[in-house]
């Protein structure tokens, strides 16, 4: 969670920056500059997320020792690191896209997308994977 939180703080900063920049450019009547800003902030956020995911994957066998000394926990963390890396990339871009949408004045749309993604897609998918496909919780 600390690793995910680190990337999330960076992404929230990009969220605010993208929101302000896009809204200012659109308000000034410069849609091309707004579109360029969207591309740049998404690219930078993606590169940061992929970089952190690469570090996590490269250090997956030793990263847990920063938080615990237990061998069992370290082995479980190393097995879960690929899931963490995928989550880092997806969660590195999502807040930025939300900031862009808010900058365009689509706050209501962002709220519906967030509710839909978390409660209409995420919870049923978690239940399906956990109970139907017997993924359950990770245990050794």
Image (cartoon, rainbow, N blue to C red):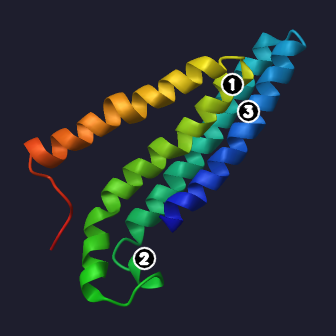
Count neighbours of disc 3 (C-alpha within 10 A) and say few if under 14, some if 14 to 19, many if 20 or more.
many
Quadrant in the rendering for residue 17: top right
Residue 28, position as x, y percentages in the image: 90, 13
Q: Residue 18's mark?
A: 3
Q: Which residue is mark 1?
A: 102
Residue 20, position as x, y percentages in the image: 81, 30
Q: Which of the two residues, 35 or 1, is positioned nearer the viewer here?
A: 1
Q: Is residue 105 above or below residue 3?
A: above
Classify mark 2: helix, strand or loop: helix
Q: Which residue is mark 2?
A: 63
Residue at the location (17% across, 48% down)? 130
Residue 56, position as x, y percentages in the image: 44, 65
Count neighbours of disc 1 (C-alpha within 10 A) and say few if under 14, some if 14 to 19, many if 20 or more.
many
Real-space CA distance between mark 1 and mark 3, rounded to the nearest whole angstrom: 9 Å
Residue furthest bottom as drawn:
69
Real-space CA distance between mark 2 and mark 3, rounded to the nearest whole angstrom: 32 Å
Task: Evaluate if marks 1 and 3 touch, with contact meaning CB atoms under 8 Å apart.
Answer: no
Quadrant in the rendering for residue 46: top right
Q: Is residue 80 left or right of residue 23?
A: left
Residue at the location (59% across, 38% down)? 95
Classify mark 3: helix, strand or loop: helix
Q: Is residue 64 left or right of residue 95?
A: left
Q: Mark 1 or mark 2: name the one nearer the start of the chain.
A: 2
Q: Is residue 128 left or right of residue 10?
A: left
Classify mark 1: helix, strand or loop: helix
Residue 73, position as x, y percentages in the image: 29, 80
Quadrant in the rendering for residue 15: top right
Residue at the location (56% across, 59% down)? 5
Q: Residue 44's mark?
A: none
């Amino acid at each position: 969670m600390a690793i995910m939180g680190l990337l999330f703080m960076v992404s929230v900063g990009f969220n605010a920056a993208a929101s302000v920049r896009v809204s200012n450019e659109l308000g000034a009547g410069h849609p091309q500059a707004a579109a360029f800003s969207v591309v740049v902030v998404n690219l930078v956020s993606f590169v940061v997320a992929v970089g952190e995911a690469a570090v996590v994957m490269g250090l997956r066998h030793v990263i847990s020792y920063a938080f615990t000394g237990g061998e069992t926990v370290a082995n479980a963390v190393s097995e879960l690191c690929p899931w963490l890396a995928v989550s880092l990339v997806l969660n590195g871009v999502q807040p930025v896209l939300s900031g862009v949408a808010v900058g365009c004045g689509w706050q209501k749309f962002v709220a519906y997308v967030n509710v839909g993604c978390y409660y209409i897609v995420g919870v049923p998918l978690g239940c399906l994977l956990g109970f139907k496909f017997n993924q359950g919780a990770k245990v050794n």
